[in-house]
Image: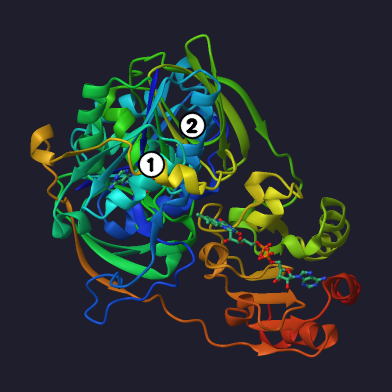
Amino acid sequence: MKVLVPVKRVVDYNVRVRVRADQSGVELAGVKMALNPFDEIAVEEAVRLKEAGIATEVIAISCGATQCQEQLRTAMALGADRAILVETDAAQAEVLQALAVAKLLMAVCEREQPGLVILGKQAIDDDANQTGQMLAALLGWPQATFASKVVIVAGRAEVTREIDGGLETLSMTMPAVVTTDLRLNEPRYASLPNIIKAKKKPLDVLRPNDLGVDIAPRLTILKVVEPPRRQTGVKVADVAELVAKLRNEAKVI
Amino acid sequence: MAILVIAEHDHAALRAATFNTVSAARKIGGDIHLLVAGTGCTAAAQAAATLAGVSKVRVADAPHYADQTAENLAALIVGNAAGYTYILAPATSFGKNLLPRVAALLDVAQISEIVGIESPDIFVRPIYAGNALATVQSADAVKVITVRPTAFDACGQGGSATVENIPAGPDLGLTQLVNRELTQSVRPELGAAQVIVSGGRGLVSAAHYHALLEPLADKLNAALGASRAAVDAGFVPNNYQVGQTGKVVAPQLYIAIGISGAIQHLAGMRDSKVIVAINKDADAPIFQVADYGLVGDLFKIVPELTAAL
Ligand SMILES: Cc1cc2nc3c(=O)[nH]c(=O)nc-3n(C[C@H](O)[C@H](O)[C@H](O)COP(=O)(O)OP(=O)(O)OC[C@H]3O[C@@H](n4cnc5c(N)ncnc54)[C@H](O)[C@@H]3O)c2cc1C
Ligand SMILES: Nc1ncnc2c1ncn2[C@@H]1O[C@H](COP(=O)(O)O)[C@@H](O)[C@H]1O
């Protein structure tokens, strides 16, 4: 069974993002970029399936500008066997939306016939939380979002999901789509030898046209602004002052 | 313009987030229908009919909606989508799981977790863990939207919508529920609580988390929350997590105890009315959003606070 892992290049989660002065988006020039944290978890899960003898090949795929090759190399350093870049120009990459990505991924799934696609539950830039569900819909496959445990038994996927009230476990037919939550696993670090090895692994480049997919955006971003700032608060000296403030000033207790 | 709101419920009662979603629908304006798909869900459907502003409740009652799987629900919704220009659901784990599937089947975008409605086709939503707000315009004929519950007040009751049964959609047989472990709690639900007492790694252990925070929460009739670090360390179950990837809350009072205030945590609580932070590190970022900060050892402060209330 092949496992396909879509990975996104995003602003590193430690970076404090700044909104551009012209309100067209957030500043990306000179900002540290990284593999989306949830996708790192997805790669790790796929690699573990391979190490357990369940998966035969792990393919990382990214849709976006040329620079996404960096994140694909990272995914291969973590254990993916090969990679596919669906390359767009930089302007298209900035407005690539979940539905378009899902369509590109669907076209690649038709070529590669994976038994499982493992995505992150959300990309930490747009916080969309859509692509996996959309891909599952387009393929007519079952979906297990927000996974904290994945077990493959007798041709079915048994996935434990983090839901608002607690946890639930679903059993589903395969092929299937899984999206990862933070507690699914703890990704390994890429070792230096593996980083070097990853440079030699195959990385194919396709264009959206090769896949016959229209990637035009459906949503137009009119502006991006900073959220209203909270007024700076005060430090209180002790519990008595805190209680007094909460009672008399804030009137919340 | 007709709006279809997907009700989140447990077959017997509506989940609170449904009320906020109906409020968002009212803000968009138009004829509002509520879809209740469930198994033996008459009680939930009757409750739905009382929501202010809802003109019709459409009920699909069939065994294959018992588990509320996205596959079967999406098929039902898409089969009944004709005539609607909006399909809304709460941005909860239920709505987030379901609505992108619906949107893709309709070949339209999905707009995630809106916090504002500027016009019938312009919406505001947080990006980058709430560090930026994007205003987006939709060009799609059908707008499929999840609504952040904390951004809209709950709608009122006292309405009397007509209730109509509709045929069930197909049972696709793709997924089966094996097990569901819901955390039982006598406390208010995190999403709806007026007061939240939230603990982080600073509490050191599950035993300390419970010994210190439960009595305080009892005094305040508060819900308990946690940072990701506290959940990962096993102090409390995953559904206590507040933040970018946990729950988004906006209580009247949020007390962060031994939580540093990483942006991913702030994303889930920065819209609280009053924020209190208790932390021994005077430079912890949580103090930048706190209305009242108390620098010191939580093991000393929290029992004192509980005693003072
Ligand atoms: C993709 C992604 C998503 C994430 N999503 C979330 C999310 O949804 N929610 C979330 O919370 N985090 C999330 N995180 C994790 C986040 O970045 C932080 O790691 C986490 O919030 C830290 O938790 P904490 O504040 O409890 O722990 P720490 O950062 O370790 O802070 C502990 C605090 O306790 C204080 N302390 C220690 N002892 C005492 C004492 N005796 N008295 C008083 N104070 C004391 C310390 O000064 C410190 O400030 C996410 C991270 C990533 C990468
Ligand atoms: N441009 C992209 N290329 C590859 N995978 C992506 C891309 N965008 C999103 N994904 C995948 O979809 C997941 C969810 O992203 P989103 O729906 O944008 O929040 C991510 O964690 C990735 O696994």
> In the rendered view, would you say B110 is above or below B307?
above
Q: Along the line of sight, which residue is nearer the eye, B220 or B265?
A: B265
Residue at coordinates 61% horizontally, 70% vertically from top-left? B261
Residue at coordinates 21% horizontally, 59% vertically from top-left? A94
Q: Position of residue A116 (x, y in %)?
A: 40, 24
Chain letter, disc 2 residue = A
The response on whether ligand 2 sits within 8 Å of label 2 is no
Select label 2 or label 1 by which is in front: 1
Q: Quadrant of the C terminus of chain B?
A: bottom right
Q: Position of residue B34 (x, y in %)?
A: 37, 39
> In the rendered view, would you say B112 is above or below B180?
below
Residue annotated with mark 2: A47
Query: Mark 1 falls on what kind of element?
Result: helix
Q: Looking at the image, tell me whether mark 2 or mark 1 is earlier in sequence order.
A: 2
Residue annotated with mark 1: A198
Q: Position of residue A199 (x, y in %)?
A: 34, 44
Q: Quadrant of ligand 1?
A: bottom right
Residue at coordinates 86% horizontally, 62% vertically from top-left? B212
Query: Mark 2 falls on what kind of element?
Result: helix
Q: What whole-number distance in Å separates the C-alpha atoms at marks 2 and 1?
A: 14 Å
- Quarter of image, res A163: top right
Q: Position of residue B89 (x, y in %)?
A: 39, 44
What amino acid type is highlighted by mark number 2? Val
What amino acid type is highlighted by mark number 1? Ala
